[in-house]
Amino acid sequence: MTKKYILDQSSPVSELVNVTYSKDSPSSQRSSTMAPGKERKILYEDVAEDHEEVVSTVYSSPVPQQSLESNDEPFTTYFDEKIPIPEDEKHPWFSFRKLWAFTGPGFLMSIAYLDPGNIESDLQSGAVAGFKLLWVLLLATIIGLLLQRLAARLGVVTGLHLAEMCNRQYQKVPRIILWLMIELAIIGSDMQEVIGSAIAINLLSVGKVPLWGGVLITIADTFMFLFLDKYGLRKLEAFFGFLITIMALTFGYEYVTVKPDQGKLLKGMFMPYCDNCGTPQLEQAVGIVGAVIMPHNMYLHSALVKSRQVNRADKREVQEANKYFFIESCIALFISFLINVFVVSVFAEAFFGKTNEQVNKVCTNSSSPYTGLFPNNNATLEVDIYKGGVVLGCYFGPAALYIWAVGILAAGQSSTMTGTYSGQFVMEGFLNLKWSRFARVILTRSIAITPTLLVAIFQDVEHLTGMNDFLNVLQSLQLPFALIPVLTFTSLHPVMNDFANGLGWKIAGGVLILIVCSINMYFVVVYVTALGHLALYVVAAIVCVAYLCFVAYLSWLCLIALGISFLACGQTYQLGLTTHPELFLLNNVDADSIVTR
């Protein structure tokens, strides 16, 4: 006998129906046994093919019957089309056909590792520390891969992405706070991405298109590109692959042009050292970690993996999906790592240790219209994605400038689109929105674009570095609100069943999250102490107390999920975690009285 739970999530449960039918019964007969006028949604199922009968426990509510595939259904998402996974009996252990079918979500996820904020962190790392921090970039990418694996497994095993899981598992007040924090992270990331695209447009137009004009252009073309999924999910994923290819070619061109020292590059990548490093280099190392591991990317990746057809009742299929998604993520992050290495190496080779006076002289000799950006003094050169392109143009010709701008535009445009998807998934998951697709895109875009446009109107394109530092701090503060929940849920056996984290993953995951969050908190403290104003210190202290209390609450729940049960102080229901997540919507009905055993 096998159990199958079918749960309606549209309203509180009002009726319980037990249905028994033969495995070989026709589908029409099975559907006829279910009461008419009910809408049901499968959240959890455990079906074995080798049993003769299936017992269904159906929880339903009296809502009008409506086909989930109806054309009148306004709730359309990225997942309207599920990619089928082909069978390959000749290659049961590994199949390139299956890998190709699973390829897509990991590359969309990897775009967050290539957004303008990351590119700016890369070039500043090269200019400030040379090749000495490449090992930090490598280590941050590996840590990011391991954390993304947890997010992907959550989506594959449960069929719910991280925001949906938070909505079902946390109590109302923590859930709302968590949603607001993630929205702040998405807004901060989106501002960097949109402004990065606007800077690229400004460079390509030789300054004729102002920053606010570039923001408006980015908004318009983002809307156009977002509707590409109307023509098929694979076409949309191919378009993202095209943008990643553009980044690889453009930044690869800069790498070949500059010809970095390969010996120094390999030493910096595989030998953890930093000779003669001081506070600037340390802050840059912290910035690399903060730029690479982004909070909204956990929510994005856990949702993207739902776009493949995986029978979650078949343990073998779930294992296979986890394997191929991990392989795809490894390939995608390896490509993103190479692109980041290109940028670090270019600025490490050409501009490490350079002064403003040296750059000013070169720009003057090359008749660059941007010479005024660099004062004629002996201060160390400071660059961002705007000045970085200008410096490349001065040293290696106008072609290097325009190719750099094309790469930044591709990075900004692709990350803006994935940021919009993150916003949609987060809002739908936390708030259970049932809006039309167009309305959801308008809302999620407006939340992020409005502050970005204001910044673009009142801020000069040449002086955006301070704002970029603030946005990095904002995202660093939100990181625990993605990492702690994903470790919590993937460690809960009622949620993940046989795929819950083992002891090794629990320890490793906890240590990694502690390290990453500690590094980012150091980055925040350095930023706040540099403000130098008493009123700002007081405000920061108040915010810090509230922030740490909420992080402590989430950590408390996470420790319980990791197996430290004496912290529970009673039932986990009281802490916001359900012992039977598949029955969470039953308003705490006793599971033992309704589960068919």
Image: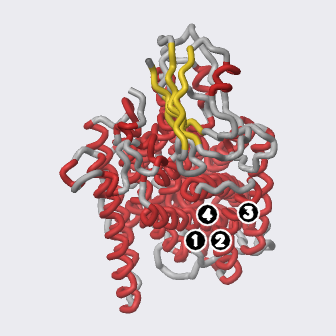
Q: Earlier in the sequence, mark 4 or mark 1?
A: 4
Task: Name the N-terminal-most of marks 2 and 4.
Answer: 4
The 10 Å Cα crowd at callout 4, few under 14, some 14 to 19, many 20 or more, is many
Task: Please rate how many residues cluster around mark 3, counting C-alpha atoms within 10 Å: few if below 14, some from 14 to 19, many from 20.
Answer: few
Can residue 269 be seen from the camera position used here?
Answer: no
Label 3: state its secondary structure. helix
The kind of residue on which mark 3 rests is Ile
Tell us which disc is closer to us: 3 or 2: 3
Left/right placement of residue 549 relative to residue 398 reads left
Q: CA distance from mark 3 to mark 4?
A: 14 Å
Tags 2 and 1 touching, CB below 8 Å: yes
Residue under the point 50% across and 23% down: 55
Q: Quadrant of residue 283?
A: bottom left
Q: Amino acid at mark 1?
A: Val
Q: Residue at x 45, y 54 (%)?
A: 293
Q: Are the residues at dot 4 and dot 1 in contact (C-beta closer than 8 Å)?
A: no
Q: Which residue is mark 4?
A: 190
Q: Nearer the viewer, mark 2 or mark 4?
A: 4
Q: Which x, y percent locates residue 492?
A: 35, 42
Residue 308, compared with residue 554, is above or below; it is above
Relative to 505, is 396 above or below? below
The numbered dot on residue 359 is 1
